Image (cartoon, rainbow, N blue to C red):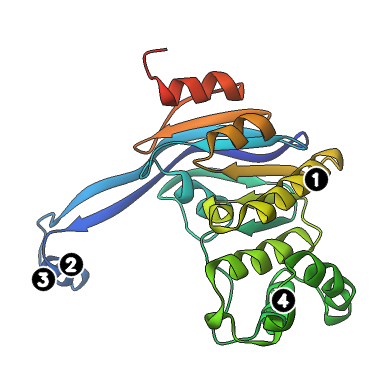
Amino acid sequence: MAENAIEVKNISKMYKLYDKNSDRFKEALGLTRKKCYREHYALNNVSFEVKKGETVGIIGTNGSGKSTILKIITGVLMPTCGELKVDGRISALLELGAGFNMEYTGMENIYLNGTMMGFSREEIDKRVDDILQFADIGEFINQPVKTYSSGMFVRLAFAVAINIDPEILIVDEALSVGDVFFQVKCYHKFEEFKKLGKTILFVSHDLGSVSKYCDRVILLNKGNKISEGLPKKIVRVQTDPCK
């Protein structure tokens, strides 16, 4: 594990799909022995490794399991079966709203997230100026985040994620809601992180960015890992499965 930041071994995530709420109720109370649900595998026996200092992209169409695997790696979801090992402090930018209290101000959420990551107030104090400078949302930092536009929200969320000294940065599709200038700013930060030897796991539908910034790419489809390898090769597989 020493050279790997993340190890995913044979992980599956199964959801029970019920046709009627009454079936869910009967099963919960043990009123029936009959199987009242259909099994849906968001992930099916997926395995891969991410080396320390590597930037790895995960691509695939909607419903392929990309966000599910990120949520399992960050501890938001538990797998149905399989084994996960993570070596390093994770900072994650998942879907908008994850890890934030919408009633709190932006500043209060900075301290909330820092505390959840195990930092003391004094340690967060030292990082606040860098967070505010990167987010660049002005006086809105003192307003409840429920009043933010999606672009303002992702600015703050990304600024927090990159300034709490992560060893592993995990970014879902959230950057797509930011304006083009902020996206460029974020990708510059990716380059800085790579030079510092930090690990990045990146999910995006922007295949151009995936090809440019990732060292390796994993392709998922309907919960299954289809392929992995050099970015341009795997991107071609997704865009033209016959290749």
Q: Which residue is mark 4?
A: 110
- Which of the pair 38/206 is nearer the observer? 206
Distance from Cα at disc 2 to Cα at disc 3: 5 Å
Q: Position of residue 207 (x, y in %)?
A: 54, 34
Q: Quadrant of residue 104?
A: bottom right
**Up-down: is 168 above or below 140?**
above
Give the mark, 1 or 4, whose residue is nearer the N terminus: 4
Q: Position of residue 194 (x, y in %)?
A: 80, 39
In the rendered image, which quarter contains the N terminus? top right
Whether the residues at callouts 2 and 3 have beta carbons within 8 Å, the answer is: yes
Q: Which of label 4 and label 2 is nearer to you?
A: 4
The amino acid on which the numbered mark 2 sits, given as a three-letter code, is Arg
Count residues near mark 4 (Cα–Cα under 10 Å), then give few for <14, some for 14-19, many for 20+: many
Q: Residue furthest top?
A: 243
Count residues near mark 1 (Cα–Cα under 10 Å), then give few for <14, some for 14-19, many for 20+: many
Give the mark, 2 or 1, whose residue is nearer the N terminus: 2
Q: Position of residue 243 (x, y in %)?
A: 42, 12
Q: Which of label 3 and label 4 is nearer to you?
A: 4
Count residues near mark 3 (Cα–Cα under 10 Å), then give few for <14, some for 14-19, many for 20+: few
Distance from Cα at disc 1 to Cα at disc 4: 21 Å
Q: Which residue is mark 1?
A: 193
Q: Which mark is residue 22?
A: 3
Could you tell me which residue is drawn at 82 percent across and 68 percent down? 133
Q: Which residue is mark 2?
A: 24
SS at mark 3?
helix
Q: Quadrant of residue 91?
A: bottom right
Distance from Cα at disc 2 to Cα at disc 1: 46 Å
Give the mark, 3 or 4, whose residue is nearer the N terminus: 3
Give the mark, 4 or 2, whose residue is nearer the N terminus: 2
The amino acid on which the numbered mark 4 sits, given as a three-letter code, is Ile
Q: In the visual, does 67 lie left or right of 158? A: left
